[in-house]
Image (spheres, rainbow, N blue to C red):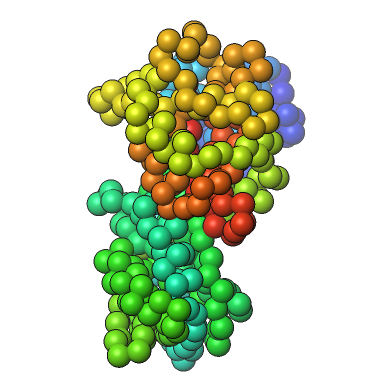
Amino acid sequence: MRSIGELARASGLTVSALRFYDAAGVLVPARVDPATGYRWYADDQVAPARLVAGLRRIGLPVAEIARAVRAEPSVVHRLLDAHLGQLADGLAQARREVTRIRRLLADDQPLLATRLVLTGSELSAAVDAVRFAVGTDPTLPGLAGVLLEVTEEEVRLVATDRHRLAVATAGATVQGPGVRALLPVAAVDRLRRLAGDAGAGEVRLTLIGRQVVVDVTGSRMRATTLTDDFPDYHALLPAATGGPARRVPIDAPWLVDALRSGTPAVTRKHAGSHLPVTVLGLGGPDEVRLLGPDELADDRTGRAGTELRVGVNGGYLLDALHAAGGPRLVLELDGPVTPLAIRRPDDPAAFSILMPIRL
């Protein structure tokens, strides 16, 4: 038999916690001395006590702890999964509340304007490089726009629909603090028209609070930014992942023609539908080709000999190639299940990323 102090040391529970779980009927002593009231526990109660200690540390309610102590392991696993789901929901809610609190604090501060001056042609090119990746899912309103990230010397434009990500930058003369603004897609399209009209002339942007004012000679546009949170995309940037394992130059017009005329190699079932998958075969350092259905053997690793195979959405790849522009582009990749990047060799700050489809 073990005293309450010995069980406390063996289990990680405090003596007071053991007394509490005794009173709650969760962990009842094997014997209580009728004269002294001392609690004594059997050796086979150490494991349940350690289980209680762990469940207590993750915040499981007492009623659920009592159930877990008496349940089969499969039941305990289900309790843990449900509890983790509740914790995740609570964390998401806490993050939303923190965002609201920060906005309230920001509303109490005097608004500082950030002003940018850049050429219409450079802004047009940046919008064209990311516009195709804007999300259209009504359940994800935070993706239905283009993020503007303003630093001391440039503005970065970012768009994503979760399946692809596009990033571009434009040099600018900046006055004021750095700022992030999520511009709705309708405003982005109006901005693109104004920038196109300006050509090599100046476009002036003023960002203050949630308002964006765009001035081009003879025209002015106003827009209100979205309040939804844009996802943290920085972890997907090539520099953040240590750089690509492979950089393969490609002839963009050839690949566009091949994608338009080629037959998708395989199909994959997703959300009840069969979706076509285009498979790129990468052999030598400068070799890229589209694989047909007859060329694909039963290869579950994505590799056949020395050739690396990558599955992508062919339509998405076409969009990325058109947005990148230029006859010579570079594919950057690490393997069949890591993001595929498309980049212009003359502009390292502009690129798009496609999520691969597991083969």
Q: Quadrant of residue 154?
A: bottom right
Taking 262 as reference, is 346 above or below it? below
**Along the viewing direction, whichever of 83 and 233 lies nearer the viewer:** 233
**Along the viewing direction, whichever of 269 and 244 lies nearer the viewer:** 244
Quadrant containing the N terminus is top right
In-image side of 289 versus 273 (left or right): right
Can residue 43 be seen here? yes
Question: Where's residue 166, x and y in %?
Answer: 47, 53
Residue ID at (35%, 61%): 145
Taking 16 as reference, is 131 above or below it? below
In-image side of 116 versus 97 (left or right): right
**Along the viewing direction, whichever of 275 and 329 lies nearer the viewer:** 329
Residue ID at (33%, 26%): 276
Taking 16 as reference, is 111 above or below it? below
Q: Quadrant of residue 128?
A: bottom left
Residue ID at (56%, 29%): 288
Residue ID at (47%, 25%): 290
Question: Where's residue 270, x and y in %?
Answer: 32, 27
Can residue 92 be seen here? no
Question: Where's residue 348, x and y in %?
Answer: 62, 56
